[in-house]
Image (cartoon, helix red, strand yellow):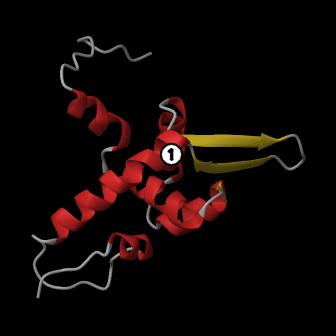
Amino acid sequence: MYHKKLEEDIRCPLEKGLQVFGGKWKSRILCVLNETGTLRYGELKKEMVNVTDAVLADSLKELTADGMIRRKSYNVIPPRVEYSLSERGISVIPILQSICRWSGQFQKGKTDHVMRQCEKCDYRFPQ
């Protein structure tokens, strides 16, 4: 089993925030769930595009553990699990949208690969 060599040393609230919702996939998951509401795992995977099962599963576990999303299991066969934003997850959406708008100011050129969820941020590439 893997053990960290150093203990976690988070001294700034920004570091903790980036640990919770930062990175490529966690922020995308939050934005997709904000746009679509409640999704099952397979539906979420289709929306994410190019994420591996292992990375998606790990990200969902971490977001659930941090209280950003809710995981609801149904006692049926086949198993059914749904994911949605928690109140904490909803509260971070304006921050992510603001980061999206800020970073969009510095992108060069235009791309057709902007996620549909980015349109809610009023995302624009500068001309």
Measured from the top left, where is residue 88 in percent x and y?
A: 48, 39
Residue shown at the point (55%, 36%) measured from the top left: 64
Name the side, left or right, on which 20 lies relative to 6.
Answer: right
73 lies above or below 114 = above
Q: Which residue is mark 1?
A: 54
Residue shown at the point (19%, 25%) measured from the top left: 12
Name the side, left or right, on which 122 lies relative to 68.
Answer: left
Q: Nearer the viewer, residue 38 or 7?
A: 38
Name the side, left or right, on which 99 lies relative to 114.
Answer: left
125 lies above or below 12 = below
- Residue furthest to the bottom: 127
| Quadrant assignment for the N terminus | top left
Q: How many marks?
A: 1
SS class of the residue under badge 1?
helix
Query: Is residue 84 something that shows in the picture?
Result: yes
Residue shown at the point (30%, 47%) measured from the top left: 23
Residue shown at the point (51%, 60%) measured from the top left: 34
Amino acid carrying label 1: it is Ala
Measured from the top left, where is residue 16 in percent x and y?
A: 29, 29
Instruction: Determine the image quadrant of residue 75.
Output: top right
Name the side, left or right, on which 42 lies relative to 110.
Answer: right
Q: Nearer the viewer, residue 109 or 86?
A: 86
Query: Is residue 55 something that shows in the picture?
Result: no
| Quadrant assignment for the C terminus | bottom left
Measured from the top left, where is residue 53 in percent x and y?
A: 54, 51
Please tell me how crowded label 1 is: few (under 14), some (14-19), or many (20+) other residues with Cα within 10 Å.
few
